[in-house]
Amino acid sequence: MTTQNPGLFIAFEGGDGAGKSTQAATLAAALDSRGFKVLRTREPGGTPIGEKLRSLVLDHGHGHIDARTEALIFAASRAAHAEQVILPALERGEIVLTDRYIDSSVAYQGAGRELGTAAVRQLNEWATSGLRPDLTVLLDVDPAVGRLRRTAGDAAEDRMESEADEFHAKIRTAFLDLAADRPELYLVLPAHLPVAELAGLILARVDALILSRQVARQASREGAAT
């Protein structure tokens, strides 16, 4: 289910190096300038326990982490994030922007680690009590391009980023398949477009979503008054 509360929940998804953080920050600034209360967060992380779990799965040096353990760590972090951060903000009527959500686990652990997309989705649906975004912005990036972006300058890749391009190719396909299954809930954009152009397309879609929610609520109020 998508959110059924006063707030709006938007997730940014895509392969490593797609530019999710940049676009989330740009959208947050645009919405804030219009007077909206915006909460920007990320996964894994977003809570004190989530940040500790983030270091376990992304930092090098923690030894071998098998695929099931990895999936469970991500789900545990997400459970805390949804319960402690996302839901309270939505109930306050805020716009929540998260850098990654359930689709990342479905793509990375379900497809990339070959645990099965249905099994990983079911695990994360349970972890979040079925909380889904109202809109997912998918920035589609070629794995080779993503790697060039990630390693620009002195940047070092984390444990997931350093996987082979074949792994990242599976993830890209999985993300696109997810969007194709529910196109009304996704905005798919090529990550190679100029930053400003991407930001304009995202803001236009979010504006339309905000307007549709306002119209629906007005109609509901009018219906209740008759």
Image (tube, rainbow, N blue to C red):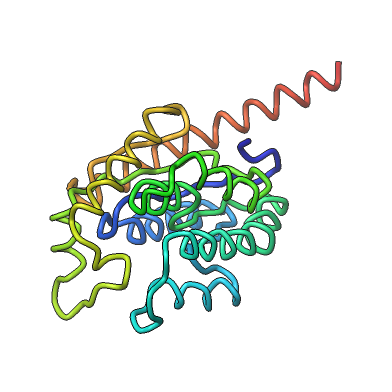
Write the residue at 50% across / 49% down. Answer: 102
Q: Describe residue 65's horizontal placement relative to residue 34 as left or right.
A: left
- Pinpoint residue 205: horizontal percent, then vertical percent: 41, 36
Q: Is residue 198 visible?
A: no
Write the residue at 42% across / 66% down. Answer: 66
Q: Nearer the viewer, residue 82 or 96?
A: 82
Q: Describe residue 126's horizontal placement relative to residue 165 as left or right.
A: right
The picture quadrant where one finds residue 216 is top right
Q: Nearer the viewer, residue 107 or 179?
A: 107
Q: Nearer the viewer, residue 32 or 55?
A: 55
Q: Is residue 4 visible?
A: yes
Quadrant of the rendering where the N terminus is positioned: top right
Q: Nearer the viewer, residue 209 or 122?
A: 122
- Pinpoint residue 36: horizontal percent, then vertical percent: 57, 52
Quadrant of the rendering where the C terminus is positioned: top right
Up-down relation of residue 79 to residue 129 (above or below): below
Write the residue at 46% across / 76% down. Answer: 56
Q: Residue furthest bottom?
A: 61
Write the residue at 13% across / 77% down. Answer: 153
Up-down relation of residue 142 to residue 79 (above or below): above
The picture quadrant where one finds residue 223 is top right
- Pinpoint residue 203: horizontal percent, then vertical percent: 40, 43
Q: Describe residue 219's horizontal placement relative to residue 180 as left or right.
A: right
Q: Residue furthest top?
A: 226
